[in-house]
Amino acid sequence: MIIGIDPGQSGGISYIAPSGGAGGRPMPLTGKEIDGHGVTAMLRELCPSVVFIEKVHAMPKQGVSSTFKFGMGYGLVIGVCEALGIPYRLVTPQAWKKVVLAGTTKDKDAAVSFVRRAYPGVDLTPGKKRVPHDGIADAVCIAEFGRQLMAKGDA
């Protein structure tokens, strides 16, 4: 089982099973914070062999408070993997987009289109959402990047 995580409040957690099936869920939240217990429960349920986490950094013109909050969520996800003893790899957005979204605009719409084509069973509109959840789409793409690396023996 390979897990892909797009950290952040609007991110997602996805999986690609050895059978080729895939799925994803929005990042679990408690109020406006990432729910560490929810992340832990999801990872325990999925029993991954490895987790690929998008390596993020502060963005220009992002406020100090929001940058701190984003970094806290990112660190929480890494901390959960460490505490559970799950191997993880950090992957930059540029790296996974270059491989998974090659030949596209490499934006959120391209990620949604990829998931709809490659993994049509993934629900990108969970709950009452009308527009596709791009955090889930990115997480699936990150997991796909990990799947391809592992298939080559590079992970």
Image (cartoon, rainbow, N blue to C red):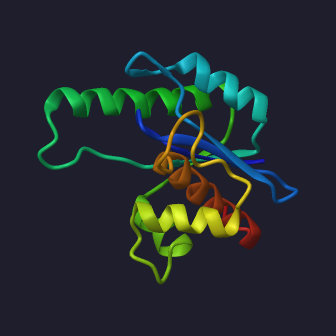
Residues 80 and 59: in front is: 59
Task: Give the vertical position of 68 relative to 124 (above or below).
Answer: above
Residue 89, compared with residue 154, is above or below; it is: above
Which residue does the image show at 11% across and 45% down from the upper left?
Answer: 61
- From what the image shows, is residue 73 above or below residue 17? above
Residue 35, how many percent across, how many down? 51, 20
Q: 52 or 35: which is nearer to us? A: 35
**Left or right of residue 73, residue 53 in this image:** right
Is residue 110 something one can see in this rendering? yes
Where residue 84 sits: x, y (%)? 68, 26
Residue at (50% x, 79% y) in the render? 102
Residue 83 appears in the figure = no
Residue 149 lies in what quarter of the image? bottom right
Q: Quadrant of the C terminus?
A: bottom right
Return the x and y of residue 51 as percentages of the image width and height.
Answer: 64, 45
Q: Residue at x 41, y 70 (%)?
A: 106
Residue drawn 72% across the image and 63% down it: 150
Q: Position of residue 9 (x, y in %)?
A: 41, 32
Residue closest to the eye, 129 or 134? 129
Tell whether 48 sits left or right of 24.
right
Which residue occupies the extreme bottom position in the image?
A: 103
Counting the numbered discs, the total is 0
Q: Residue furthest right?
A: 19
